[in-house]
Image: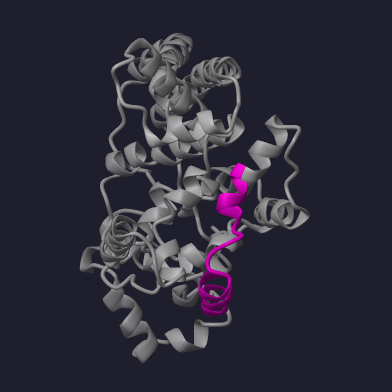
Amino acid sequence: MLFSLGYFGFYKEGCVCPIGSIQNVALSLFNSNYAAPITVVMFFVLPLIFALFFGRVFCASVCALGAIQDLVVLKPIKLPRKLTIALSMIPYVYIGTAILFAATNTGFIICRYDPFIGFFRLNGNAPYLYLGAGFLLSGVFIARPYCRFFCPYGVLLGLMSRFARWHLAITPTDCVDCRLCEATCPFDYINKPNTGLEREVRATGVQRLGYLFLMLPLMVVLAGWIGHRMSTPMSRYNNTVFLAEQIMVEKANPEMEPSLETTTFRSMGMPEEQLIADAKKIQAQMNMGGWMLGGFLGLVFGLKLIGISIVRDQKDYEVDKPTCFSCGRCCSYCPSDEMHTPNFLPGSKALEESLALAKPEEVKPAAVTGEGQD
């Protein structure tokens, strides 16, 4: 991780990275005049392939953005589950908007608003440096805030990691319910057993689930309509559309003094009609993209609600495969691991340090807590 931070971060100045390569790949797919370099394609594909087999090992060991945040994790706290679920929608908005802007040649917003690029290049605009500093400052208490709640590439890695064959896992037959893995994971990505908890009436849950399935198409259409309404202001971020609207305003108001942009355009000799036609084409593309982006976000939101409503019995501690960074922090504290068992003998210093990481109520014997009784 330190090597990746030094090489991919400060030496390569954060470029090229798989996160930004999303835009290059999207532009090459929708614009026949652009071909993504093979290096960019490899940076985009390889972490996904590794995630499909081993989980998000790229996040744990290679990503420079993750490494710089990992250095400041000092006093991590666990956020409320409802808050984390709500914040988990942000990466979907980010990746959808980034693809839309790249596909319409509007801009590469991931690279433009990268919060850590200013640190890697040792320069940058003050607002972006403040943004990066804010992420690092909050990262002292909220482990890896950008990775968990903003990274657009994490959406794709999570999808691949869900089906990972050799993902980091907790073996139920060897688990002694010591809760050390739960206490040592700063990201709260270990799902706890739910046996013995009070459950709602089954008919109530089934009824709510049925309502959500019926509402899912409505949420998709409604969100698509919102995306359609947002397409007009979003299209103004495109230079062609912005310039065309300026020229149309100046033509409607002859007394207005021409701006520097319109003066430069007229000096190039390009017909205004061609510019306006290109702008209308981009606006049409943005309108269609707004429908698709909104519908996609509505679908994700609806599926998240359905996922929350479906509660399955869970008797053992389990790693949350889509979100787990595969950092291995929990492994070094697991007393069931044969490599570490000798260090966790009663009275050992390693055991005392491990128990100190957990809250008192989190390390009580299973017979006291009522969980894991044989």
Relative vertical location of residue 29 with respect to residue 77 in this rendering, above or below: above
**Position in image of residue 333 (x %, y %):** 44, 75
Q: Is residue 364 visible?
A: no
**Position in image of residue 170 (x %, y %):** 54, 60
Q: Is residue 112 visible?
A: yes
The quadrant in which the C terminus is found is: bottom left
The quadrant in which the N terminus is found is: bottom right
> Is 110 on the left-hand or right-hand side of 15?
left
Please tell me whether the stretch drawn in magenta is mainly helix, strand or loop.
helix
Q: Nearer the viewer, residue 26 or 1?
A: 26
Q: How many numbered dots are placed on residues in this image?
A: 0
Relative vertical location of residue 198 with respect to residue 148 in this rendering, above or below: above
**Position in image of residue 138 (x %, y %):** 26, 61
Question: Magenta residues?
Answer: 2-23
Q: Nearer the viewer, residue 9 or 237?
A: 237
Q: Quadrant of residue 181?
A: bottom left
Reply yes or no: does residue 21 show up in magenta: yes
Please name the colour scheme applied to the rendered image: one colour
Q: Residue furthest left?
A: 360
Q: Nearer the viewer, residue 46 or 76?
A: 46
Residue drawn 45% across and 50% down?
Answer: 112
Reply yes or no: does residue 77 show up in magenta: no
Q: Nearer the viewer, residue 234 or 274?
A: 274
Q: Quadrant of residue 262?
A: top left
Relative vertical location of residue 333 with respect to residue 142 in this rendering, above or below: below
> Is 369 on the left-hand or right-hand side of 323?
left
